[in-house]
Image: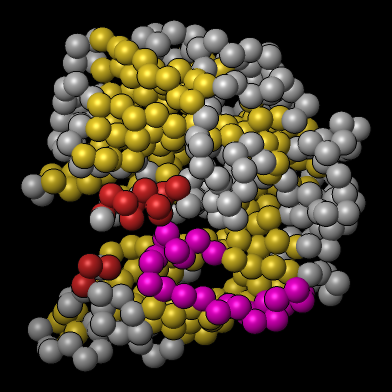
Amino acid sequence: MRIRLLLTTLIAVFGLLLTSQKASATHASGGELIYVHISDSTYQFFLKFYRDCTGAGEPTSWQLCCFNTCTNQSFTANMPKWQGTLPPDNRANGSPVSAGCSQYTNKCDNPSSAVPGYREWWYMCIVTLPLKCNYWRFGVSLCCRNSSTNLVGQDNFYIETTFNSSQTWENSSPFYSVKPIPYVCLNQPYSYNNGALDSDGDSLWSALLNPLNTNSCTSTPSNVPLQTLSPPINFNTNPFQTNNSFNLNGFNGQMSFTATQQGSGVIAMKTREFRKINNVVHELGSIMRDIQVQVLPCSTIPPTLDTVSINDSGAFLNNRVYGCIGQTLEFCFTVSSTDTGAILLAEDNLITAIPGAAITYTNLRTDVVTGCFKWTPTANDVGNHSFIILIRDSTCKPPGIMLQYARTVDLTIWGPVQASPDTSICIGEP
């Protein structure tokens, strides 16, 4: 039952990757690779590939390369197309993915459109690992990348996921719950989050890295060369041209930046997974996402999100909400725009981030939307949590992009901790 529920949950939100050792022609726009534990040493791998509609057609299958450093041996597994539909709306595999508005075409509909267009393809295979090892690397590679403003040339597109199986077989990789390929407005502040989650409750930490390239199953991936720009490209404050305004919160994955160069910039994110086993913290592996950020000239005003009220059972301090086990945590927030003509929509990833919690939205499709959160955490929920509010402005100003913004809300749930011998942090505790 646990495995079936896990598969259902992960499939409902995965944003994954791509790869092939032999495919060619420019069309790789983004993706990632993840795995789900089935039983013993058997895992189900999913690849989600975002194909540029102006490039070559998608491959019929991909080769997953499996390599371990304990024996320095490798093997491959064929990944055919996923035969199911795509969540959350049961679209056919290969359906267009676009932030465009219905009254505007994109390049999937009309090659002469100014709005980029993409198709989403899923691939899947099942792999049984022959031995435990502290470093398994699973990778996929594709020729070729789309051209970009921050990378030199169009090297192979490569993504990998790693796994330390020496500690346990029972592990599913983290996954990204928000689709990639964001559209942003030139010279306007923007926030985005890939929505990294872990179904096993492991701790995660995210950071950017140089996009990678390889053409061999056993060779060490190399960094893709970077364009010489001013200010220089770096993966802390300027992964593409943002005038060093880029910031990433490694704990919750929240990014903020102001793009200063029109065109397509590429970023690669690595999310590492940690678990305490026998009171020792071990790194169990990592996943990667390689995505394009499309910077377009547009005039949509970014909305803002403010936490406005917390009930008596919780507290709000330093941009974090605090609550206690067994006590209902309730708070409300507003999403607003200084553009009185804005038509704001809001949704969230609670179904996977915090199962059992709920948000009620009011005044949708206006310039001020209110959301009210409600959750009663249990003893199993002690610790840190995050969820993402996805905000879209559907006014659809030219060039016809429905811009999506991501805001992260961080929570900490206290257990039965005493502040002093006769003072409890949570109300109602002895």
* Residue 5 in view in this figure: yes
Image coordinates of residue 197 in percent, x first then y, are: 40, 51
Q: Residue placed at 42% from the left, 59% from the top?
A: 352
Give the side of residue 23 with respect to residue 328, left or right.
Answer: right
Q: Residue placed at 26% from the left, 82% from the top?
A: 326
* Residue 32 in view in this figure: no
Give whichever of 91, 346 is nearer the camera.
Answer: 91
Q: Residue placed at 21% from the left, 91% from the top?
A: 428
- Segment colored magenta: 348-371
**Can you say which quadrant of the picture contains the C terminus?**
bottom left
How many marks are shown on the rendered structure?
A: 0
Give the side of residue 391 with respect to residue 187, left or right.
Answer: left
**Can you say which quadrant of the picture contains the N terminus?**
bottom left
Image coordinates of residue 258 in percent, x first then y, are: 70, 47
Image coordinates of residue 127 in percent, x first then y, are: 31, 27
Colour scheme shown: secondary structure
Please tell me in which quadrant of the rendered image residue 52 appears.
top right
Image coordinates of residue 203 in percent, x first then y, are: 31, 50
Q: Is residue 88 magenta?
A: no
Name above or below for residue 231 compared with residue 384. Answer: above
Name above or below for residue 185 compared with residue 375. Answer: above
Name above or below for residue 242 compared with residue 3. Answer: above
